[in-house]
Amino acid sequence: MKKILLLIAAVSISFGAIAQKGKVTSALSYIDQGILDKAKEAIDQALANESTANWFNTYFAKGRLAQASFDSKDPKVNAFYNDPLAEAYTDYQKALELDPKGTIKKKMLTGSIFNTLAISLYNQGSTRFQAKDYAGALESFKTQIKITESDMYAGAVDTGMYYNAGLAAVNCAKYTEAITYFQKCVDMKYMGVSPYFQMSEAYVSAGDTAKAEAMLTGLGEKFPNDKNVTLQLIDLYIKSNKNAEAQKYIKVAKEADPNNYSLYFAAGIIFLNENKYDEAIPELTKSIELKGDLFDTQYGLGAAYYNKAADMFKKANEIMDVKKYGDAIDEANAVFAKAVPYMEKAHELKPDDQYALQNLMELYYRLKAKDPSYGPKYDDIKAKLDAVKNK
């Protein structure tokens, strides 16, 4: 009698396992039909049952469902998993691990499962990047890279994914990762000189300006006709406070591109920061001659005249002779007056900029003592500054 009971029990267990495997088959059918809530219910039951909890088909079905939930237009279905595409990738990997005979691998290759998943990950990464979720974008692009580098991917490698991953990594301050991805672009000769520039920026952000400089200085031979190489070096030297080196390359760049206003602006700002006003003023003047509709150039030249006048005013206060003192003050005020049209233009180009408003107010205040026409201008600009501060 015991043998009969044992036989009946074994048959019951066998039928139970078959029933649970049928849940997985049903789930796959539901997914194909777009009945995803029923598919979720069937998969959850299969995962809860001992006979199918570690069956490769269960995880294959769960991966299909997770992938379908990402593509669904139903918010309730989207919420099945916190990160559906990451879930799908994990489930597919689990299915492959649990299937030593390779049944799932053949099914996934035949159905181009990883190809469609890679496309979805690219779309997800792009959306996250646009939303400034750079860490999330990086994870999407990293998974896309893992897929396309695997033997489960049948399509052509998208070299742009490494560049995308590098940009996402830079924006979430993972500079070492960024450099790795941009180096991959360099190795694949993707995007020409751009990945070199991106690597240089990543090195600077990571605090290694020596490597950034070494990389850029070697680019002249590789890209002899690219003017941006010199511009990148100039930018690096400015950021590193290596003013002499920056001016050296600015001079070289001017010879190749004499009508580039930004070169004169950069030279002028370097001189301005060094308190070399007489050197800064002609550079900034030339910059405005080439392009006069920019706030920064107008403000920069106004600041150069303002700071020069303030320095003259300070030196005038050291003069003991009354007449010489008066003459020196008049000279300083004449230079202050030269700052006015540029600060006014800067204010016109950016009406709410507090620095331009503050400087204009101070200029009008200084000059109204000798020229009453500045009085109403002072009152008007003070009111505007107060309004901006109280916003």
Image (cartoon, grey):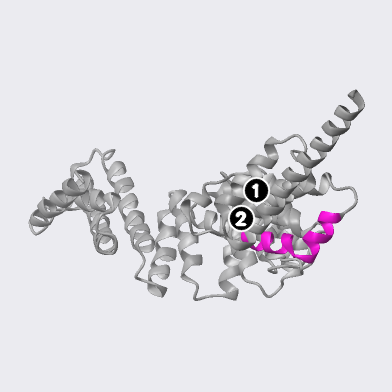
Q: Position of residue 285 (x, y in %)?
A: 38, 67
Task: Report the residue that reaches farthest toward the front.
Answer: 1
Query: Quick check: can you spot residue 66?
Result: yes
Tell me which residue sits at (56%, 49%) in the image.
134
What amino acid is found at the position of numbered circle 1 in the picture?
Answer: Ala
Task: Report the residue that reaches farthest toward the top.
Answer: 2
What residue is shown with label 1?
A: 86
Query: Residue 225 versus residue 43: which sits nearer the camera?
Result: 43
Question: In the drawing, what numbered circle is on residue 167?
Answer: 2
Q: How many marks?
A: 2
Q: With 82 as the anchor, is 303 left or right in this view?
A: left
Q: Position of residue 353 (x, y in %)?
A: 28, 53
Q: With 317 as the anchor, is 94 left or right in this view?
A: right
Tell me which residue sits at (69%, 45%) in the image.
176
Residue depth check, mark 2 versus mark 1: number of the one nearer the observer = 1
Q: Earlier in the sequence, mark 2 or mark 1?
A: 1
Q: Within the magenta stretch, is there residue 54?
A: no
Question: In the drawing, what numbered circle is on residue 236?
Answer: none
Label 2 sits on a secondary structure element that is helix
Instruction: Point out the stretch of residues depicted in magenta.
Output: 103-120
Tell me which residue sits at (56%, 71%) in the image.
254
Label 1 sits on a secondary structure element that is helix
Number of residues whose C-alpha sits closer than 10 Å to that of mark 1, classed few (under 14), some (14–19) or many (20 or more):
some
For residue 151, above or below residue 259: above
Q: Within the magenta stretch, is there residue 113?
A: yes
Q: With 340 as the anchor, is 4 left or right in this view?
A: right
